[in-house]
Amino acid sequence: MNVEDLPTPAVVVDAARLEGNLATMARARPGDRLRPHVKAHKTTALAKRQLAHGHTHFCAATIREIEGMVRAGLDEDLLLANEVVDASRLGALVRAGARVTVAVDSEETIEAARRGGVEEVLIDVDVGLPRCGCRPEDAGPLAEKARRLGLRVRGVMGYEGHVVGNANRADRERGCAESMRTLLSAHAEVGGDVISAGGTGTYACNLEATEIQAGSYALMDTAYAKLELPFEQAFHLMSTVLSVSERHAVGDVGLKSLAMDHGNPTIPGAQVLFCSDEHVTFVPGASDETASVSPIDWSCPSRLRVGDRIRLVPAHVDPTLACHEKIFVAENDRVVDEWEIDLRGW
Amino acid sequence: MNVEDLPTPAVVVDAARLEGNLATMARARPGDRLRPHVKAHKTTALAKRQLAHGHTHFCAATIREIEGMVRAGLDEDLLLANEVVDASRLGALVRAGARVTVAVDSEETIEAARRGGVEEVLIDVDVGLPRCGCRPEDAGPLAEKARRLGLRVRGVMGYEGHVVGNANRADRERGCAESMRTLLSAHAEVGGDVISAGGTGTYACNLEATEIQAGSYALMDTAYAKLELPFEQAFHLMSTVLSVSERHAVGDVGLKSLAMDHGNPTIPGAQVLFCSDEHVTFVPGASDETASVSPIDWSCPSRLRVGDRIRLVPAHVDPTLACHEKIFVAENDRVVDEWEIDLRGW
């Protein structure tokens, strides 16, 4: 089947571009120097491609993601890079033989890990992003407390999420270095051999982390395209044109099939006017000065008919993939595989 | 179980407020004068509550929603209020005995209806919202074409979506009246006994439509709260506090569990700073001047501990519900039922 014959909305992944991105990252961050973040794609079949490129340790953001990775046999070293107050489902996985480490940043989350039966933790440190993470000066005492309770403290984690998306490369590198100074100072108090940090935007400049938690590099989006990284746009949403007027056309992709937190999707060769629940209204042939997409070899025709297919690139890959049930894998626009997006939900 | 003991993120519906909203609407628009739009909640169990309030005709935005409504036995008169270029799955439902009408706005979509085996259509007319819908002057000729092909043309549809959200009531009413003048002029050429239009924002002022396509009134959100409608906020997202610092706190609801197209969610009693994939960062005790929520009887405490529960009201109900697998129904914060959100996907 050709991708243009798929029922829409459909997530289409270009296999060659995906493999290219995975290979580029594996050269820069081979083996366990990368801990691929499955929250970006929520798909164990894609995680297995990352495994084939040499990465055996993974991280995740939800308990459901960890459970799914265990079910898929990808449980050599799983990190829940997030706090939980009920670790009982994780503990059950540990008792069944999986290696699961959880991030902790407070006495309560340390207690939760112990109570739930998780045996290994990372101390999550605030390195500048106002989200989770303890104060750097609290990292040592928290590690001590965890060890007193019998937990193994493997090291520290600190996500420089406030700088990974900075399009100014020098600023991004400077911000990353500053965050890592904070993380290293905390690590000196905590100990352990893991310094887990980073993302797609800082995988190259973050030289302090022992492992980088990158996920979006595999498929990319228009927000990451602004950073001039060596990764290509490897997925798009296929949409059917439902209506054409003199002024605009309408496709069947909308707020329920793409995430809008980073703004409108991009349709190369057209200007997106707005999205509603099940629709995107756009002007074929108009150009969008604000659009940024890695080079691609397709574009929206300037004259469209009802039933034509168009392709959109979302602004934010992670929550967009979470809207869908499956990925269609394509080679030169021929559908060669279907992957279930099997790590959705909580 | 109390709602505060639910695993999070969780969609919680207050049964009394839901029933109140359904009753208020059923008084204003009894029976078939309302065609509840299931795209807002994607839940056949909730549609059955709407049926209990006297509405037997429903509308939907996707084929999957129509299929699910048929499976649930709610198929007395179903309208797919959207264009499709492949109506074969709808035709299969018609052959099995369901009554399914589909919107058409072009020769191609009329052909698709006929080819797929759908026997009844509404002519969808552009009444000012730049989306689907034919030019008013094309409505008559399209109806003729449909009838020539053997389809039954039941009337017209025209959604005044460009005015339903206008917070200025006089402007909203004026815009609605203007759109309905357009729709009535098209109806004069098309014929049939259905004039389907409207939504939660115009259910009261739209006196021209024979039936109103409202959905959001059942559960509400902060965008609709701005319109001073007689409907109460009937659902929220329950979230667990994962991390607390001196400056902010973090809950486990984020971009994958709420829609951001209408902006940040509201946490009464707190100020939302930003949302990321799995988190909301907020300042407890701070006030948010821009927030608007129908009166509710709960609020975020100004001092929080890890593990506490907080409640968020999303800005846009429809795409938020589509992120979730189920609804927890509560009476006075006691969980009394679980409803599967069974109409997701395409």
Image: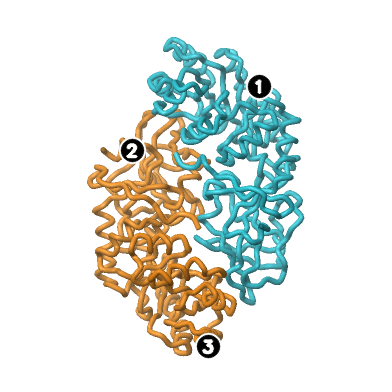
Chain colours: A orange, B cyan
The residue tagged with tag 3: helix, strand or loop? Answer: helix
Q: Which chain's residue wears label 2?
A: A
Label 1 marks a residue whose chain is B
Residue placed under numbered mark 1 in the picture: B210
The residue sitting at 54% across, 72% down in the picture is A132
Q: Position of residue A49 (x, y in %)?
A: 28, 60
Image position, residue B112 (x, y; %): 40, 23
Alpha-carbon neighbours of circle 1 within 10 Å: few (<14), some, or many (≥20)?
some
Q: Going by the image, does A290 lie left or right of B202?
A: left
Does residue B164 appear in this view?
A: yes
Q: Secondary structure at mark 1?
A: loop
The residue mark sitting in front, 3 or 2, is: 3
At 35% from the left edge and 79% from the top edge, which residue is drawn?
A: A210
Residue found at the very far top of the displayed protein = B148
- Cα–Cα gap, marks 1 and 3: 71 Å
Q: Are dots 3 and 2 on a single chain? A: yes
Residue A173 lies, with reference to residue A221, above or below; the image says below
Query: Circles 1 and 3: CB distance less than 8 Å?
Result: no
Q: Position of residue B254 (x, y in %)?
A: 54, 59
Query: Is the N terminus of chain A in the top left, top right, bottom left or bottom right quadrant?
Result: top left
Furthest toward the front, the residue is: A96
Which amino acid is tagged 2? Leu
Return the x and y of residue A110 as percentages of the image width and height: 54, 78
Label 1 to label 2: alpha-carbon separation: 37 Å
Task: Give the amino acid type for the residue marked by disc 3 in the picture.
Answer: Arg
Judging by the rendered image, the residue that carries numbered circle 2 is A6
Residue B114 location, quadrant: top left
Q: Which residue is mark 3?
A: A148
Q: CA distance from mark 3 to mark 2?
A: 56 Å
